[in-house]
Image (cartoon, rainbow, N blue to C red):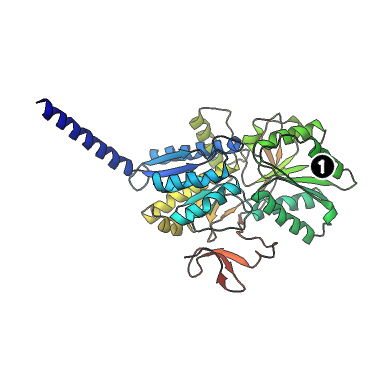
Amino acid sequence: MKMKTLVSSIALAGATLVAFNVQAADTIKVGVLHSLSGTMAISETTLKDTVLMMVEEQNKKGGLLGKQLEAVVVDPASNWPLFAEKGRELLTQEKVDVIFGSWTSVSRKSVLPVLEELNGLMFYPVQYEGEESSKNVFYTGAAPNQQAIPAVNYLKDELEVERWVLAGTDYVYPRTTNKILEAYLKANGVAEEDIMINYTPFGHSDWQSIVSDIKKFGSEGKKTAVVSTINGDANVPFYKELGNQGISAEDIPVVAFSVGEEELSGLDTSPLVGHLAAWNYFQSVESDANEEFITQWKAFTKNPDRVTNDPMEATYIGFKMWANAVTDAGTTDVDAVEQAMIGQETANLTGGTAVMNKNHHLSKPVLIGEIQDDGQFEVVWETEGVVPGDAWSDFLPGSMDLISDWTAPIKCGNYNTKTTSCSGQNY
């Protein structure tokens, strides 16, 4: 009897395990590849929470294809090579159907070969330098023509800026963006001696001498501005040092591409009032969709003080489009979803419509916001409509002849219109 009982118990346990495995396999897995520790946690943790909120919302609607969604969260810890390792883990061990992740371009470029090797699918929700288009990535943040170029035009045309400080963190996004901006400024008649370029490492904290150099550069009789591609928690001491040295927005305005509401929430913003940021969304934008999103976010986080920001909206748009594409394709198969994504439309949070183009980049509005003393932004300029994102810059010699088109017959991320050939990934 004891032996029979034991055998029965083992059989029951085995059946339970099999049932659990079947149940686990019966979910659609959503990978979350964002730094939850290290220098980029200040920005990326919020995006992890945004994905979790979207998963919860979709599950309340019944999930997708009759299945519930299951979020699988990993922490690459602001360690760029670890993004590749964690991405591989998500695709091979966790068997995720899609990944939402990365902030810095170096982290995206780290995981990109893994995505292409294993045919994974990732949504990248942050402004970046362009010069890339992969079948396996959808770029829902801004390309340079949707952020950097309009910001420089605003400073040049509206504030009559003549001297330029291009200050960035030392990695691929700031260096490539500043290469584009330097070429653009020179093409618009700016002399080389009126452009100052400076790079600092991630997490840089001693800004005294650099801010002093900026102050000196701006004291030579020409209106000067800082175009900032400084990323992560280095922004906190940078802005503090501007205040310490008495640099106001009237003296030398700063327009930032990586500072939003989340980063400002940890700062005394009083010395920063009047400085600028260029994004495609601000929390202060008035629309029914935005009001609903903010309410949902505060309820999800159970924190009435939590703010929203641009990469959150890019995550929101990407998630909505992915869910629609899965529904349209009737499967989570990457190749089918990739093709179903092209042409997807969904409401953005600024009152318009986001469209996914053939180059895997969105059409988005461009907004310039001015920092207020409450850490929010007042929109001081915006485009009349949406701007399609360019994968390749019109201002770099090696890029101006390239286009990206993932539809037939081209199906190529870097197609040379002069040679009519594809020089990279295609299928």
Query: Residue 109: where, in percent of width, then height?
Result: 56, 51
* Residue 396 or residue 9, whichever sits in front: 9
Q: At x 58% / y 49%, what residue is drawn?
A: 141
Q: Is residue 2 left or right of residue 27?
A: left
Is residue 312 depicted above or below 119 in this figure? above
Query: Which residue is labeled 1 in the image?
Result: 214
Q: Is residue 344 visible?
A: no
Q: Can residue 118 be seen in this view?
A: yes
The crowd level at tag 1 (other Cα within 10 Å; few <14, some 14-19, many 20+) is many
Q: At x 58% / y 40%, what residue is drawn?
A: 78
* Residue sticking out furthest to the right: 221
* Residue sticking out furthest to the left: 1
Q: At x 55% / y 60%, what residue is drawn?
A: 359
Where, quadrant-wise, is the N terminus in this rendering? Answer: top left
Q: In this view, does 8 lie to the left or right of 248?
A: left
Q: Quadrant of residue 389?
A: bottom right
Query: Residue 285: where, in percent of width, then height?
Result: 62, 41
Q: At x 71% / y 55%, what residue is drawn?
A: 179
Q: Is mark 1 on a helix, strand or loop?
A: helix
The amino acid beneath tag 1 is: Ile
Is residue 136 depicted above or below 214 in this figure? below
* Residue sticking out furthest to the front: 3
